[in-house]
Amino acid sequence: MPPREPDFIEPPLPPLAWDALPGLFPGFADPGRWLPLLRRHLELVEAAAGRVRVTAVAPPDAIRRQYAESLELLRMAGPFEGSICDVGSGGGYPGIIVAAVLPEVPVHLVEPLRKRAGLLEEMATALGLANVTVHALRAEEAGRGPLREQHGLVLARAVAEVRELLEYTAPLACPGGVIALPKGSRVHDELASAATAMRELGCVLAGCELMRAEVNAAVTVVRFTRDGAMPAKYPRRPGIPGKRPL
């Protein structure tokens, strides 16, 4: 799947301060524990930039674009049970951030590029996130392996149409599980083109809502639930979902 991060339009807002995050996300307990972890994560990302490039977002914008948006995605995903799977984790957005605020929840990071996967393992160790497991796999491989139909929540911030992303993510969600995807301005066109993918992959549209203006009102979070059986033929072999989306 595409390694690039989302190209959502940056809202005309001033840079966000770290200390604003607990107020924006009061539902995430113990900010005195997780806020230093997020700050340290950004330091690790910046320190690794010379050997592994994981973001094009400038440091002044990172708190809003990477950390607040990741937390907002988790908040808007709604209730779920079980583990979380982040597809195309890159530098750990949102997977590392999610693992930091939910230390009791197992979080699986699927990242196909081995350098990035190695960096994710280094970051999880440095941050003491024992709930993180990194899988150096393509999403199509993960969906046919031991991660298949195992997770109560599947997240993906990768650049791809909804119909393509569903084939990467839906096979990883357990029956009744939630899939949450942040999308840009073409979200409604993408949803209109995703009817076949939803039907084939047993997914039902559960919600479509803008992020709060304080975070980024240019981003819509689309939520699906796994409501039907997952045919054995999905996901198709690596590369096919991108070339021939459902």
Image: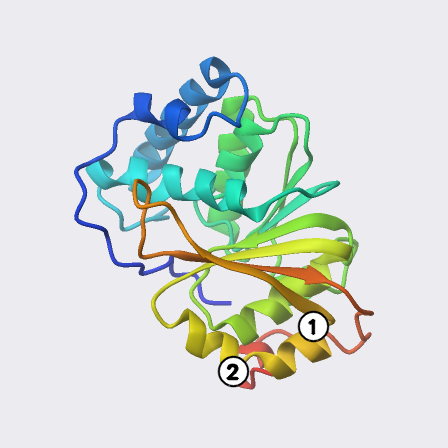
Which one is closest to the eye, mark 1 or mark 2?
Answer: 2
Q: Which residue is mark 2?
A: 193
Seen from the viewer's position, the closer of residues 185 and 117 is: 185
Q: Residue at x 48, y 21 (%)?
A: 34
Rendered image quadrant of residue 176: bottom right
Q: Residues within 10 Å of mark 2 (few under 14, many from 20)?
A: some
Q: Secondary structure at mark 1?
A: loop
Residue 85: image location, x then y, percent: 64, 48
Rendered image quadrant of residue 226: bottom right
Seen from the viewer's position, the closer of residues 60 and 49 is: 60
Residue 236 seen: no
| Labels in figure, total | 2
Q: Amino acid at mark 2?
A: Ser
Lateral position of residue 229 relative to residue 90, left or right? right
Residue 89: image location, x then y, percent: 50, 49
Seen from the viewer's position, the closer of residues 188 and 112 is: 188
Lateral position of residue 219 relative to residue 80, left or right? left
Q: Which residue is mark 1?
A: 235
CB within 8 Å, label 1 to label 2: no
Residue 161: image location, x then y, percent: 47, 73
Residue 43: image location, x then y, percent: 33, 28
Q: Amino acid at mark 1?
A: Pro
Residue 6 sits above or below residue 91 on the image: below
Q: Residue at x 25, y 58 (%)?
A: 9
Residue 7 sits above or below residue 162 on the image: above
Q: Secondary structure at mark 2?
A: loop
Disc on res. 93: none
Residue 20 sits above or below residue 213 on the image: above
Query: Between marks 1 and 2, how big is the CA–CA gap?
Result: 18 Å
Q: Quadrant of the C terminus?
A: bottom right
